[in-house]
Image: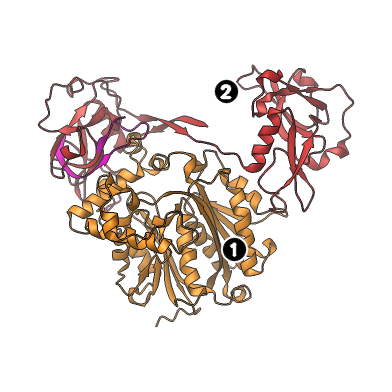
Chain colours: A red, B orange
Amino acid sequence: MRVDFDYTRSLGPVLSVFMTGLRDGRILAARTSAGLVVPPPEFDPVTLQPPTQFEPVADTGVVETWTWVPDPVADQPFERPFAFALIRLDGVESTLLHAVDVPAADDMRTGMRVRARWREHRVGAITDIACFVPEESPASTPDTSPSVPTAGAGEPVTGIVTPVRLRYTYAASPEESAFFRGLADGRILGQRCPACGKVYVPPRGACPVDGLPTTDEVELSDEGTVTTFCIVNVPFLGQRITPPYVSAYVLLDGADIAFLHLLLDVDPAEVRMGMRVRAVWRPREEWTTSLENISHFAPTGAPDADYDTYKGHL
Amino acid sequence: MRRVAVVGFAQRQALDFPGSPTCVELLVPIFAECFAQTGWTKDDIGFWCSGSSDYLAGRSFSFVSAVDAIGALPPVVESHVEMDAAWAMYEAWVKIQTGEVDTALVYGFGKSSAATLRRILALQLDPYTMTPLWPDTVSLAALQARAGLEAGRWSQADLAAVVATNLTRAVTNPHAVRAASMTPEEVASLPAYADPLRALECAPVTDGAAALVLAAEDRALESCAQPAYITGFAHAIDAHHLGTRDLLRAPSVQIAAKAAGVTPETVEVAEVHAPFAHQELLVRSELGFTDSTTINPSGGALGGNPMFAGGLIRMGEAASRIWSGQADTVVGHATSGPLLQHNLVCLMTSEPTGGRS
């Protein structure tokens, strides 16, 4: 399962100064009650006042502590092994976390002098410093051009965008597993609570009324009743169907809980509570263990269900 | 203050729980275990409070699905913290203090294996200057471990001894997911993983859940022969930026312990939430414990550390030493945030008055 979003934040007056400095190839420290601090804190932890004085500091410093990263995770500064270090920039009272690019752990030691390797194209982010390197490394790498401001030079940097890309291995519960395997055979399987007898679809790990595991499997009809619905008129990112279209809660015959699906093949203006609908399955050769095996629901044309048959599910 | 006691506790831990990230399948049996211990049913529980994380589950409002495990009809009074469930226990304790309820069931759950745990936890860091570098949890802990090694605060042998003690004790803990009768020398002979940390010095990535029952004093004895009375409970937090903290100190541990009224020399057993070996030494030092206090008889977090339940497990393990009569004064500690940033200390005694003069 993928969860992706751009973490987009405005910067306050303090971090705006810091990020603008980074874009321009300068590290700006805040003058606080503890001396010069990088990155500048938004509020001084002692005086509780926002810092107002900023001073450029050297992009060189000393490694205070470090660790070797033998197996980097996605989006870290390097895909190959590297070091993370807390670096005390010259003249600064605090330390800055960043990567140090050396070939092997044996090339790292506490107390070693390092300097920033700047990116050529800078946007106003902590990653404008690509990494730190041993101070004696050759200076003429392609990345090193701190005097050349880039994107939006002259304008203050007022926001950051951090892409967040998360990957999960989603495991289904035993009940969900049975449900998805059933779908691959064109069957809709629910589970019945042993105490109250209610049938849940998709099945849940426990009956939300009784808190008991639902163990009794029930095969359900692919016909049901619309209990409620909404007409989607608003376009949004990732939308697969052109609006307007209908999302409906369908109470399958034999189930005690409605579930959400698409209702198509009908003029949205015609859709109503109580409408009888049937699943429209995709061609059998396209079936997988997915609810998408059901393309959508469509009206059966049968007379509407009596209100009493679904009033308990609104 | 109302006197409140821990009267029930159950847990499950696994290296790779095969079920859903809501952990409903884990919660149902541990709630049943808590009911069996107390003789209560869900109708006896006045307040439900959970700790979990949507980032761990990979879905929003994941804790709402977990409410299924309660059986919430008629509706229950429920709350949630996006933190370790030890803080849910704190909230429940406060709720009982208000007099609105007399009992509470606190639970936490986390399927740490659903994503890459050490990467996911970078999302709890400063979003401007740290998260964009994706500093993983193990790397951050290793920075702290090396700082301590080079400052002479602890040695590699000290860290190996912490691992050997915890993993050997974990052998007798049926819930531990990592256990081994090892000598410090055997641990010390293992190679570094994230230099200077060895893999065994890092808590295993653990899936699991835990639940704990609290009762006001007047309800405690009906549910538990020897309740563990909470006589002090406090938490405190250090600054967020690692670069401005002294990583060899955790002042918030000391502040919380003082506020909870901990007198170190009277504490017989402490369960310390230290996901990395050196952090046990650091917390122990902040709490002022000497060799007269047994630390982590359960094997601690190095034997198993389900995210968002690991701190609550420390509370339950500590309380269980009072139920069993092994100790009269115990401390449970929980931590949250990067490198021991946020700390919770709970002092529990066998007598409601605490026996402190």
What segment is highlighted magenta in the picture? A60-83
According to the picture, the residue beneath numbered tag 1 turns out to be B104
Query: In the rendered view, does A43 fall on the left or right side of B121?
Result: left
Q: Using the image, determine if residue A281 lies above or below residue B253.
A: above
x 12%, y 33%: residue: A135
Q: Is residue A39 visible?
A: no
Q: Is residue B8 visible?
A: yes
Find residue A210 and report its horizontal and vertical position in percent. Answer: 72, 54
Tell me if residue B55 is in the magenta stretch: no
Towards the viewer: B247 or A189: A189
According to the picture, the residue beneath numbered tag 2 turns out to be A236
x 36%, y 43%: residue: B125
Whether discs 1 and 2 lie on one chain: the answer is no
Towards the viewer: A54 or A230: A230
Tell me the amino acid under the disc marked 2.
Phe
Query: In the rendered view, does B20 fall on the left or right side of A183?
Result: left
x 11%, y 25%: residue: A138
Find residue A133 and report its horizontal and vertical position in percent. Answer: 17, 32
- Marks 1,2: beta carbons within 8 A: no
Q: Nearer the viewer, mark 1 or mark 2?
A: 1
